[in-house]
Image (spheres, rainbow, N blue to C red):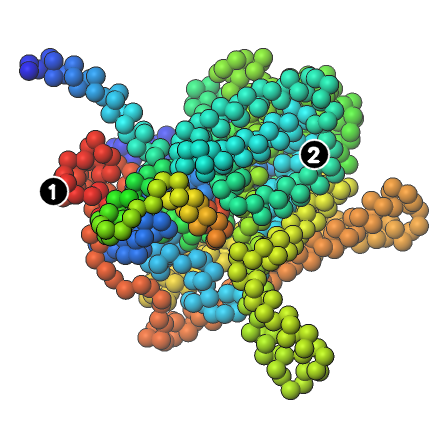
Amino acid sequence: MNATTANTAATAAAPRRALARLWWYVREFTGENAYDRYVERARREHPDAPVLDRGTFERRRADGHGSDPREGFRCC
Amino acid sequence: MTPKSIAVWATVSVVAGLGWAMLALARGEEVSAAWMVAAALGSYAIGFRFYSKFIQYRVLKADRTRATPAERLTDGVDFHPTDRRVLLGHHFAAISGAGPLVGPVLAAQMGYLPGTIWIVVGVIFAGAVQDMVVLFFSTRRDGKSLGRIAREEIGPIGGIAGLIAVFSIMIILIAVLSLVVLNALAESAWGTFSTALSIPIALFMGIYLRWLRPGRVAEVSLLGVGMLMLAIVAGRWVAESSWASAFTLDKSTLVIWLVIYGFVASVLPVWMLLAPRDYLSTFMKIGTIGMLALGILFTLPGMKMDAVTDFASRGDGPVFAGSLFPFVFITIACGALSGFHALISSGTTPKMIQKETQVRTIGYGGMLMESSVAVMAMIAACVLDPGLYFAMNAPPNIIGADLATVSQTISQWGFSITPDQLAEAARQVHLDDEGLLSRTGGAPTFALGVASIFSGVIGGSGMMAFWYHFAIMFEVLFILTAIDSGTRVGRFMLQEVIGTTEPLVGKARRASWMPEGLGRLLGRAEPVLGKFRDVGWLPGVYLTSAAVVVAWGYFLWVGVHDPLGGINQLFPIFGISNQLLAAVALTVCTVLLIKSGRLKWAWVTGVPLVWDAVVTLTASWQKVFSDDPRVGFFSQRAVNQDKIDSGEFSGKELEDLETIVTNTTVQGTLSAVFALLIIVVMADAVRVCVKAIRNPETAATHEAPYEESQIIAPDGLVATKEEKAELAAAGLGPGGGIPEQRTGEQEPAR
């Protein structure tokens, strides 16, 4: 591969990388990746135990947040 | 420092200095907002680069090798090491609300200069310092709350006084925020309809997230924001249709709706309404603030308000009474120093931070962002014609209720605005001709300023009405979230307090002096009291929620029916209470610095504490004891009581006088109680400090023991050269947590 095509490839990849970064940030920020994190952790620490499906996990997580309203308090 | 960085920082200082000089010296003509931006951003940069670094490394001695609670106690849910850039977003979204938007708008009555100076100087030396130091100490203590830290490090008396203070402050906070919403929505079919529609939108999002596509927050938020935009557009159609009258509500009706809403919202499960609306309001908040920053930079509007108005020296301003000192500081509140932030800095954030050394970026940096929001609010208020500004922010008992009288009163103050101009401004945003008169509370003024800036970029004057209602919606949304979550926090505190009376009642019941009948009654009550601690016990939830709602509902009702103008009377109490909470937080910080043997650095939080205490206690003193009936609650009470006693008044007038007497009694008493509670906390703290200075060996702090950190993560938003090398050596890409840039097998955050 000569230098010009390498450059073109890099330029073409730049917006895609920027989008990937943005998507990564949004998922981290909104907590969408909490389930992936849970699965990874559960598999690592208890490889034999069953893993919750996403719906059950998310519902439990949401209900847990309701038990102490001081988490997620919004300021003035 | 290298010669290059010396040159850079010298340039930054010159730019900031030039900005301040232009702001201060301009007389009689419009000043470009560019100078305010330069002054603020330049000063923030210097404060962040030099002062926050000094605090982090010299005062706090933050240790990057020490594991944080997120690492030591990690459970993947509450305690979870979070990328610093993501955590900064979370922290900012949690601390920023309506406060920094409303305070500066009200303070603008004294001109833009006094308020702006305090927003910038206050944040650098007080507000950001408080947020950062509280975050640091809480991180060192497993992410414990400010209240717990106060109890453990100062003592039970200070702790209890603090708890009562936080509870009552929460009530006032909710009442004032509700009042802001009310004043923005009253007699506005457009605003009321759009806001009402946000409830079904949030419910839809909640169901979507729970059953249809669990956990897909990003897509549902985008959907929700889209529907919200439609709701704002549809508001116009409704306002022009025959339905308009159904959504044109007066303030009393809105109070009832808001109270019902507050109760229902706070007893519903979190996933139904609170969580989805929070996603919605967070997206709107970050989006709108970002757009406003761009809009200001793009248009660089001229500010029409004077640098310093006559009201600053005379202290008889129509928006809030009282002289520049102490009331500008009280009114600005959140944008410069906010006690409420200490609750966030000792809440979720310390449980998620990867490194102690990130407290500077997140605590100090996050508060600088909040302060810049306050500067933008100041700009938004000052781009409006001052005549219009006063017409919107003064209560009717001062300026009158019809266009001609208002125009005349305002001209007497030296600002000119014709009745036609007032009517035209109101028609532009689709309100009745008198629709902007006395639309107090700050939110409408902010929205009008935002609309004039946005319509300068997109849509021209034809879009004024849309942008105005867009900005109103943006504020109302997160105030509704704050009402909901504040009611829940208040309820939680109440449940805890009632629950803890169980053993006390048990003891009293078994006491020998207890008459048999009463003892039996208490015996029956005892287990019920204990049940209140169970947050899932529904009767307890309903009762305590109702109690909290009734408490803030009372102040809201009072605010709406106050003949003197509710914002005028209640906002100072809110400001005072927030600043008193800051005094508690700064007291805790100072005690901890002294107890941990850092007496020589105690001034870092000690000086802002003394300043804050002087300002706030002076304000409380004036609110309680001032002879000026516009300022002092009790002299106001006396004047009106005399009028009642004279027997010359009857009917509606007499009713108004009686209302004023009741209101001022409650408000005056409350001001006094707040001040006393805080004095108790501070006196208790002084006792602890004196003991610690006399016998340093007895001063034990409750820090969690040292454990070595395994996490590799940069301190600042952008990794330095050394940090990048460190990440690379560990097999991580320069981005740390960004997948595409990760090159090793290792986990980014373990």
Percent across and percent down for residue B522 are: 65, 74
Residue drawn at 80 percent across, 48 percent down? B659
Q: Label 1 amino acid? A: Ala
SS category of the residue bearing label 1: helix
Q: In terms of image quadrants, where is residue B435?
A: top right
**Quarter that holds the N terminus of chain B:** top left
Q: Which residue is mark 1?
A: B729
Q: In terms of image quadrants, where is residue B561?
A: top right
Give the Cα separation between the discs numbered 2 and 1. Answer: 63 Å
Percent across and percent down for residue B350 are: 36, 51
Callout 2–callout 1 Cβ contact below 8 Å: no
Counting residues from the N terminus, which is met first, the one under dot 2 or under dot 1? Answer: 2
Report crowding for label 1: few under 14, some 14 to 19, many 20 or more residues within 10 A (C-alpha). Answer: few
* Marked residue chain, label 1: B
Same subunit under labels 2 and 1? yes
Q: Which residue is mark 2?
A: B394
* Marked residue chain, label 2: B
Please give left or right for residue B159 compared with residue A28 in the image. right
